Amino acid sequence: MKTIVFSGFLGAGKTTLIKKLVKEALNGEKAVLIENEFGEIGIDGGFLKECGITINEINSGCICCSLVGDFTKALNKVIADYSPELLLIEPSGVGKLSDVIKAVKSAVPNCDVTTVTVVDAGKAKIYSKNFGEFFKNQIQYADTVILSHTADKSEKVLNTAVDIVKNLNASATIISTDWNKLSGKTILDTIKGKNTVDELIAELLSEKDEHRHDHDHEHEHHDGECSCGCGHHHADEVFVSVGKETTNKYTKEEIENILEQFDEMVAGTVLRSKGIVESVDGQWIHFDYTPGEVDVRYSTPDTIGKICVIGSNLDEKKIEELFRL
């Protein structure tokens, strides 16, 4: 059974995020929410019932501490009563995510657990200092980290929050775009491991692989080798790829200028570049580059700025300098 655990400090916006996903992305999928409020009254229950989601509230404390037994009982009852396709778990914001994961896997040993941590972008710095162990644990065990309250934050504040997350969990997928600009489906796809910078790089490498096979000599192949004995290599064995995420904002002219510099070999031999970044005017810019061809246009918002470059003998530092990374 697919299970998504939503972690984050109190007030980070977990309930608002869940409501958005339920309304815009689940499309009638049989989902059940297990909610654990820290305290005596479940204040968000009615809020989520409006979305048509079933709620089973536990109000005596934190599931990762004294409530592991009650949590297991509640979870098994939910599965028996509703046979959900998707289980959403919103634990108290004061527990360790690692303990929540253990509790879930103990209750349902074969469940497929994905973890999401919501971090208030403006409070990331102070929380990392004042609530070190709990804050760090929530990020270190997250598959996806979603920054909240980003609409009015400066690039400096956003970059600081992203750096804090990356320093604690380099493999986590980060969403830094104001989620009001994103569809629930886009967010859910990202949580499920789609729409990442790694996926974009894989797509570009696949393009190059197909290109090589189309244009290499047209000989018969036997056992994976060209019959002439020259051999073939996959794109990821021949090309170098650079993939970066950014919260920086650009103008169309700035992106066009960067891509035109690739033609001058300032960063090595760039064979392909693709990405999407936020514009200084709040729009989003999608760009495509192949030698001699530049396509820069406005597009729909993405979860975070993504920049991918593929080529040979690439100068990664120069690429970072060009994009102000």
Image (cartoon, rainbow, N blue to C red):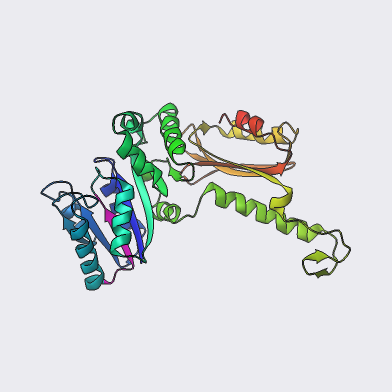
Say which residue appears at 39% left-offset and 56% top-offset.
114
Percent x, y for residue 314? 70, 37
Q: Is residue 12 magenta?
A: no
Residue stretch rendered in magenta on the structure: 83-91
Q: Nearer the viewer, residue 305 or 134?
A: 134
Outermost residue to the right: 228
Residue 271 seen anywhere in this rendered image of the structure? no
> Where, quadrant-wise, is the N terminus in this rendering?
bottom left
Foreground pick, 267 / 299: 267
Residue 317 in the image, given as x and y percentages of width and height: 64, 30
Q: Which residue is pictured at 84% across the width and 69% down the height?
A: 220
In the image, taking residue 216 as reference, residue 266 lies left or right, namely left
Along the viewing direction, whichever of 98 and 21 lies nearer the viewer: 98
Q: Identify the residue at horizontal 33%, vertical 49% (top origin).
A: 98
Q: Quadrant of the C terminus?
A: top right
Q: Residue at x 38, y 42 (%)?
A: 139
Q: How far from the left and from the top, in percent, is residue 188?
A: 40, 55
User: Which residue is at the far left?
Assistant: 40
Tell me, yes or no, if residue 120 can be seen here.
yes
